[in-house]
Amino acid sequence: MLEHGGKLRRAAEHFDIPLQDWLDLSTGIAPYGFDLPAIPTDAWLRLPETVDELETAAQGYFGAASLLPVAGSQAAIQMLPRLRRPLQVGIVSPCYAEHAEAWRREGHRLSEFSEGSVPRALDGLDVLVVVNPNNPTGRLLPPEQLLAWHGRLAERGGWLIVDEAFMDPTPSHSLAPHSHLPGLIVLRSFGKFFGMAGARLGFVLAEQSLLSVLSDALGPWPIAGPSRFIGTVLLADRDGQRRQRERLLGDSARLAQLLSAHGLPPAGGCGLFHWVVTEEATMLREFLACQGILVRRFLYPPSVRFGLPADEAGWARLTRALSSYQALSA
């Protein structure tokens, strides 16, 4: 399996620091969530009902004409390559590594290239995959540029897949309102913005004919009843969403300032994380881990991604650790 953020238990064992003593900044998941309602007993006792309010709430939240709930956007990432015969796929990289792995696993021909190479590569592609905002760089492409790429692909029956897992803090940049267009597939996460990664809920936004094929491939009851209930409530909570968005954007700006003040200016980021490119990525990650702070390291390019602390105690702890690292590096 590919490397991901989290895996706190493994870090606790490796660095011999008790699990409860860690500050986990490795995942890009909101460290605080919403007030949760009590889950009805029927959600546990009965098989999940698909004729409920989840789809309607999600359509209102995303502004999408049609969508399909899935067990986290990862389920769609793994299934979509199985819906096409082997073809030529392009991926704007670096990005979330599961995309390339999923298409490669199903026998597709794969090219990975930078954003600047897309225009000259498009005519040779059947599928283009873009993560927007990008993970880990935080790069946010304008909707007009993505729609232009989609238009060129759609002329030949191609797909543009846009993974918007980190889009919720900046919804005006989303392609969700355009997801009814043939050949445009938008993936959205529920767990990251809402702080509910354990619910394993995501959405595929696309034209209905493609969603029907994908639904058949995924089989019945892909979403647990409690997750459907929680998703319905939180996707309709406009006041809660506004507060969450404001808090995340404020904390994101605070994190960028903190990192810059300690000689680690971010090269990119979004409302849920910041990305620092440094040749000392491995040393920085190990130093912080020895302080019980887990961050995500990337090898190419050497870099570290920082998520947001949940509270003032976490901010103070990160500040102390960065100050110690800066003093050590001086």
Image (cartoon, rainbow, N blue to C red):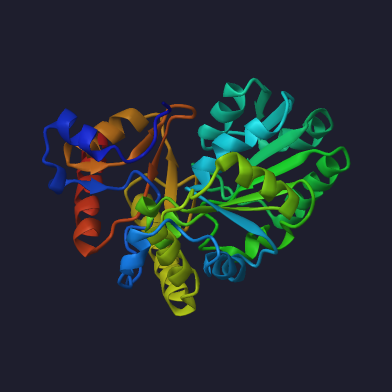
> Quadrant of residue 56 in the image?
bottom right
Residue at x 71%, y 56% (from the top left corner): 179
User: Who is closer to the viewer here, 208 or 159?
Assistant: 208
Query: With 259 as the anchor, is 22 left or right in this view?
Result: left
Residue ranking furthest to the front? 46
> Quadrant of residue 326 in the image?
top left
Establish if 160 lies above or below 311: above
Query: With 330 as the anchor, is 111 left or right in this view?
Result: right
User: Who is closer to the viewer here, 155 or 56?
Assistant: 56
Residue at x 25%, y 58% (from the top left corner): 315
User: Who is closer to the viewer here, 299 or 77?
Assistant: 77
| Picture coordinates of residue 28, whole percent (x, y) | 40, 49
Task: Judge whether residue 207 can be spotted in this image.
Answer: no
| Picture coordinates of residue 165, whole percent (x, y) | 52, 51
Establish if 62 lies above or below 68: below
| Picture coordinates of residue 68, whole percent (x, y) | 60, 54
Quarter of the picture containing the C terminus is top left
Establish if 58 lies above or below 148: below
| Picture coordinates of residue 52, whole percent (x, y) | 52, 67
Task: Judge whether residue 267 can be spotted in this image.
Answer: yes
Quarter of the picture containing the N terminus is top left
Residue at x 51%, y 53% (from the top left corner): 202
